[in-house]
Amino acid sequence: MSVFIVLAVRPFDEGKTRLAAVLTSAARRALCERLYRHVLTVAIQVLPATQVLVVSRSESVRQIARDACAIAISETGFDLNQALSQGADRCRDLSAKAILTLAGDLPELAPCELLRMIDRQHGNQAVIAPDRHGRGTNALLVPANSAIRYRYGKDSFLLHQQAAKAAGLCITPIHRPGLALDIDWLEDLRDWYGFVGQPFYPEEITA
């Protein structure tokens, strides 16, 4: 089965605004880049780089993708769900059979977790990986010909289940540590420190 991965990545200097109280702008930019590079690296360990697509308004983000031999396209809007739809449309043009949309801020993501998602997708299955709070969505794998609408944002795990059901898909949730931990809040950053054993930017944290 021809699976494509889509990442929608905002410019690094626009990311992680919820951490503005505890990280400087330079630290947030570096954090965004580090997280993106990690997820991109894992993606191309799982699939050929020609089946990994990055959508972004940032030339530097797109260049990193091109340097990894992935596909990079310029985002035409400013909305995450629109960007993912734009990427999914390109994947369909490239004869994708299934499309995996993936968050770009998963510091503990491992290849085996994406492979497990892919193994569970067949027929009319929608495989959904929630965040660790069970509210957001960090990865969604659906057949390329499905009519599902992307609903990333608040309560997206529930909304994606509803959208999958409306599209006639069977829903398979998947719970894996590397798919569950994303970095949005100070508590996420502190919990990640527990995983990696040392602070990412100890000198930058002010709270």
Image (spheres, grey):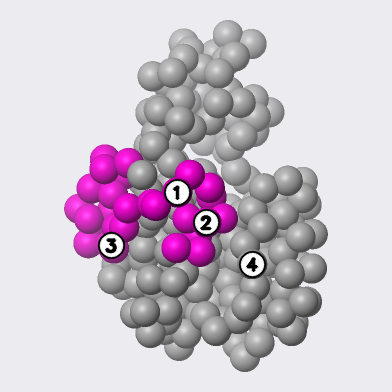
- Name the residue beneath numbered marker 4: 149
- Kindly report the distance in space between the C-alpha atoms of the residues bearing marks 1 and 3: 21 Å
**Which span of residues is magenta-colored?**
58-86
- Relative to the observer, which residue lies in front, 156 or 41? 156
- Residue 207 image position (x, y, % from top left): 64, 11
The amino acid type of the residue labelled 1 equals: Gly
The amino acid type of the residue labelled 4 equals: Arg
Query: Height in image: 20 above or below 192?
Result: above
- Name the residue beneath numbered marker 1: 77
Badge number at residue 67: none
> How many dots with numbers?
4
- Residue 191 image position (x, y, % from top left): 64, 33
Image marks 1 and 4: residues in contact by CB distance under 8 Å: no
- Name the residue beneath numbered marker 2: 82
- Relative to the observer, which residue lies in front, 58 or 64? 58
Mark 4 or mark 3: whose residue is earlier in sequence: 3
- Name the residue beneath numbered marker 3: 70
Is residue 190 in view?
A: no
